Amino acid sequence: MFESPLPRSYTKFVGNWLLASGENARGLLAFALITLGVLVTRFGQAAAVIHPLIVAQVARAGIRMLPMVSFLAAALGFVVIGQTVALLTRVGAQHLVGTVMVTAVVRELGPLVTALVVLLRVGTASVVELGTARAMGEVEALEALGVDPVHYLVVPRVCGMAIAVFTLSAYLILGTLAAGYLFAFLQDVPLTPAEYFRQIALALTWQDFVLLALKTLLFGLIIAVVTCYSGLARPLRLAEVSAATTRALVWSLVACVFLDSVFIVVYLLM
Amino acid sequence: MEPTLPDRRAIPNGAAHLAGSAPGQRAQPLIELRSASVCSAEQPNQVVVQGLNWTIEEHQFWVVGGLPGSGKTPLLETAAGLWRPRAGTHLMFGQDVAEMSSGDLDRARRRVGLVFGDGGRLFGELTVLRNVALPLCYHRECGEHAVAAQVAALLADTGLSLLADYYPSQLGRGWRQRTALARALALGPELLFLDNPLAGLDPRQRRWWMEFLTQLAWTGLGTERRRMTVVVAADDLRPWLGMARQFALIQERRWVPLGTRADLERCTEPLLRELLAEAVDSG
């Protein structure tokens, strides 16, 4: 007999969900601390093996994503920024262009869109790889050889995704600002490039650069830790890998949006 | 390069053989499990072997038999230090695993080679050469070129030289199993655990394995000729009768030490009689 997928008691369902969420959050935090510990204490160890893996992850999560990010930068510039510039010009508020650009692109859209792209293209693939490796017993094989699985499998991904989200965000922001001006130019908006970029430069503060770096690095760390945790932290069967991938996607998304809201508060306090 | 089979008459007999130890001096056991309960890796609450008292001494050749699913794999993995026993004491090279730091445990694991069953659990994204080179490069903190000679020697010993650039998915089961053997031997372990190494192999591959393990256990490999302690888990004891010196069974979660080849003849365990019927009758 198959049981109904619907819960019989919603209070029990919510209670169980809360307990499971708390347990997952605890596990994730513990995994993140272990990863951080290994990253700090073992970064220089086995450099001949680990550093090429980090480079490979940077290439995979960063360089190979450039065409996709270029396309998104063009789309964002044309659809969102171009429209905003055109609208502001129409209502005579061209002097706010820089502020709007910095708020919308530099602070919010750039980091968040990049994080989503890396999560969808690389994070999910990581869960599948690590989950399959776990299900096939490769993690135990590493341990049997005295190779720390966190050092070998997690640290390169954490470094790779953090660096990739940071650099891709910078690339996306520059591309979006350029594409936005191109669209505004095509709409005959009376705004010179010098004026456009002068307004953006004036609207930027040094805190924007610091917070952008911090935010993008943290996005990368969150995506890497959550996806690695979902694939590795508990014994999996092959049939469970797809469910683990979906779970990792949701958790990463929620964690990134939560972190983004924390940064919004910081920006508002600035 | 095919290894040469040593003269069987030269193989010492008896469980008490402890080559390398001084006369009258008993060598320290490599592995000891006392009153231990072993759990399944997939279900950590399920005990698969209990009341286990097992001592593995230097230069012994153990074969642990049992039906498929009887708990041989978790037993080997626990003895190799991958899992902790649910109850009892586990000593590796004289040190209690429960009291070891993670660094000490890593060092102890490196003195033990483990050849997993069912294809050897190779790293699918690495070639045969890199699978074998990985533990060397990781622990010696060097690049592949620095260990190239040693890796080439291991590949030659295991007949894998021509397959060095293949990925595990491109190889048959027998070659994957050999790659796992070469990888396990890379760090020069003192003790080698093998989980059902002959399962699913063709007669030629089986013959190679028997000859290679005979050489490993009784004459040693390479120029050093350092003999290795070998523990094999097997569904079928018959191929090992002429080779192993210590036998045990896992039956209904019980650890049943059987003694030497001579003791097998006198043993009345129904499962053993069943497993050996053909071999003992014909032998």
Image (cartoon, rainbow, N blue to C red):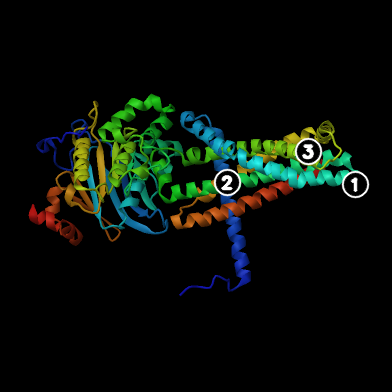
Q: Nearer the viewer, mark 2 or mark 1?
A: 1
Instruction: List the residue tagged with mark 1.
Output: A91
Element carrying mark 2: helix
Q: Earlier in the sequence, mark 3 or mark 1?
A: 1
Residue at the (27%, 43%) spot, across then down: B56
Q: Position of residue B69 (x, y in %)?
A: 31, 58
Spatial distance from mark 2 to mark 1, Cα to Cα?
A: 40 Å
Of A36 and B161, nearer the camera is B161
Spatial distance from mark 2 to mark 3, Cα to Cα?
A: 28 Å
Quadrant of the snapshot with the C terminus of chain A:
top right
Instruction: List the residue tagged with mark 3.
Output: A181
Which three-letter amino acid code belongs to the residue tagged 2?
Answer: Arg
Q: Circle 3: is it few (<14), some (14-19), or many (20+) Cα within 10 Å?
A: many
Using the image, name the chain to which the residue with label 3 belongs: A
Using the image, name the chain to which the residue with label 1 belongs: A
**Location of residue A62 with respect to B148 vertically, above or below:** below
Q: Nearer the viewer, mark 2 or mark 3?
A: 3
Q: Position of residue A19 (x, y in %)?
A: 60, 60
Which three-letter amino acid code belongs to the residue tagged 3?
Answer: Tyr
Element carrying mark 3: helix
Instruction: List the residue tagged with mark 2.
Output: A121
